[in-house]
Image: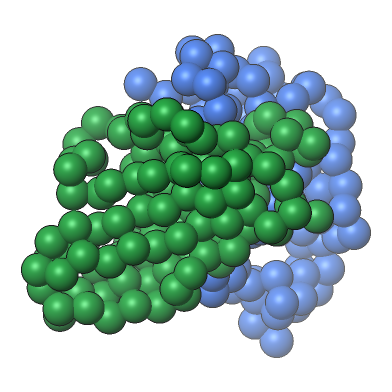
Amino acid sequence: GAVVSQHPSRVICKSGTSVKIECRSLDFQATTMFWYRQFPKKSLMLMATSNEGSKATYEQGVEKDKFLINHASLTLSTLTVTSAHPEDSSFYICSAINPGGGTDTQYFGPGTRLTVL
Amino acid sequence: EDKVVQSPLSLVVHEGDTVTLNCSYEVTNFRSLLWYKQEKKAPTFLFMLTSSGIEKKSGRLSSILDKKELSSILNITATQTGDSAIYLCAVNDAEYGNKLVFGAGTILRVKS
């Protein structure tokens, strides 16, 4: 149990285009999901908390108009990187809390590697 | 501001060695500490600790929390090359709901 998937696993796009990344909880309902960004050999940096049915809560320094988050159902959250630039190239990881496993344990998706040319 | 510090930042050992990874934290209202293992993709959950002095064990891995010292250790005995990974420590501060604050990680490399 507690499987989280992400799609796509890898995406290459041109500068100025938008990219959507999906995060799904496959075997549980997740009212809360999180989006992280990770640079090579660095730790995870929390970007935002995605709450089902309400607006996402963004961390300080993260542009909400650039990183659009939608949590339309209990099993799906999406992150859209708008007008992507090369500096947005990174590894994006989502996580979800499985209420059945305790509210503190986050289960991570496999990540999406974004490369902006 | 919450802070999680891991040490060492990187470590190279030989198969069969025992390693101890450290994690110390400063948070407003501690709720739990979690250990994750990250190989090429996303982190996989290892342990969640909430109480001092109670060891959690899974095979060759074990972990314990010391709330007085605001720290935790992760032990790996009889290391294998498959243990090579980044080990991440994260802390949940009840002041901020379910958010986790991650340390920088320890890069472990086990040589055969």
Task: Give the colour in which the image draws chain B.
Answer: blue
The answer to whether residue B90 is seen in the rendering is no
Residue B1 locus on image (x, y percent): 35, 21
Task: Give the colour in which the image draws chain A.
Answer: green
Residue located at (64% from left, 53% from top): A25
Residue B107 locus on image (x, y percent): 52, 63
Spot the residue most to the bottom. B112
- Residue B66: image quadrant is top right
* Pick the front one: B112 or A83: A83
- Residue A20: image quadrant is bottom left
Asked whether, in this view, residue A30 is left or right of residue A87, the answer is right
Residue A8 locus on image (x, y percent): 45, 73
Asked whether, in this view, residue A7 is left or right of residue B61, the answer is left
Residue B56 locus on image (x, y percent): 85, 40
Asked whether, in this view, residue B47 is left or right of residue A64, the answer is right
Q: Is residue A41 above or below residue B51?
A: below
Spot the residue most to the left. A16
Residue located at (71% from left, 77% from top): B82
Residue located at (35% from left, 45% from top): A69
* Pick the front one: B75 or B31: B31
Asked whether, in this view, residue B107 is left or right of residue A59, the answer is right
Q: Is residue B15 above or below residue B57?
A: below
